[in-house]
Amino acid sequence: MSRETDLNIERAPHILSTSSNLLGFTFLILTSTRIVGLPSDSIIPKIAAGCVAIFAISSFLSYLSILSRSSKRSRNYENAASYIFFLGQLLLTCGAILLSINLI
């Protein structure tokens, strides 16, 4: 195997596991906002729903990267998963900051 393929095989499971864990965490946040009764026009449930979608897409792309037989396609899937995962982290961080300073 080439060095690039080795790096993709090493990196893909990390993004997949972390992204799927954060997907579950954001589902928990979304469910908690519904149970607590936050208004649906509040920003926190919208951010949580966006994070759910982003982490689901990132998990899916990372899984496709692992399954791909083409190293170029695997690298493209993993790069897309990485960028989308980073976007999810930024959105989750913004939501946590808003929640912590009570700007719901």
Image: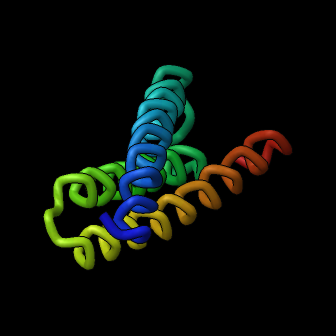
Front in this rendered view, residue 47 or 78:
78
- Residue at 45% x, 66% y is 84
Instruction: Give coordinates of residue 14: x percent, y percent.
Output: 47, 44
Is residue 74 in sight in this rendering? yes
Instruction: Give coordinates of residue 3: x percent, y percent.
Output: 43, 68
Instruction: Give coordinates of residue 12: x percent, y percent.
Output: 39, 53
Please, is residue 97 above or below residue 8 in the view? above
Q: Quadrant of the N terminus?
A: bottom left
| Numbered marks: total | 0
Instruction: Give coordinates of residue 58: x percent, y percent.
Output: 37, 56
Please, is residue 99 above or below residue 91 in the view? above
Please, is residue 87 above or below residue 42 in the view? below
| Residue 68 left/right relative to 10 | left
Most extreme residue toward the front, as rendered?
Answer: 1
Front in this rendered view, residue 44 or 87:
87
| Residue 72 left/right relative to 22 | left
Please, is residue 29 above or below residue 6 in the view? above
- Residue at 26% x, 78% y is 72
